Amino acid sequence: MCVLIDDQRQVVESTITEHCRRRGWELLALNCRTNDVHVVVVAGSVHPKQVRIQLMAWCTRKLKEMDQDSDLCGQPVRQNWWTERGSERFLNDEGALAAAIQ
């Protein structure tokens, strides 16, 4: 299990925010916890699985860069930041959207 410290959580939040901005996706909710990240995004015709893959890839890059720039005292850079699972649900009505944001 990976536990994100405050600096890493900030990197994840800023990376997701910036990636959504660059892609023209509407970021409706973002909550990066120590061991969990929740995101609600309106991404047009992009499949939710692709949204998740892209966000995980960009966050991984930024976290690895952060690791390489820090003093790791000879420790290897973490390779796995995420679990394999994750929600990729379509939110097809206002109720489902409100519940996901909540």
Image (tube, grey):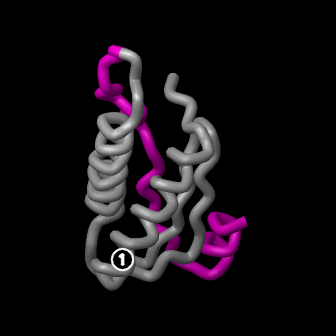
| Magenta stretch: includes residue 91 | yes
Nearest the viewer among 68 and 93 is 68
Q: Which residue is drawn at 59% across and 70% down?
A: 29
Q: In this view, does 94 lie to the left or right of 24?
A: right
Q: Which residue is drawn at 26% across and 59% down?
A: 50
Image coordinates of residue 71 in percent, x first then y, are 41, 29
Q: Which residue is drawn at 29% across and 55% down?
A: 58
Nearest the viewer among 58 and 5 is 5
Q: Residue at x 42, y 55 (%)?
A: 88
Image coordinates of residue 37 in percent, x first then y, are 54, 49
Nearest the viewer among 28 and 62 is 62
**What secondary structure is the stretch in magenta mostly built from?**
loop
In this rendering, is residue 10 above or below 35? below
Image coordinates of residue 44 in percent, x first then y, are 33, 82
Callout 1 environment at 10 Å: few (<14), some (14 to 19), or many (20+)? some
Residue indicated by mark 1: 43
> Mark 1 falls on what kind of element?
loop
| Highlighted range, magenta | 74-102
Q: Quadrant of residue 98?
A: bottom right
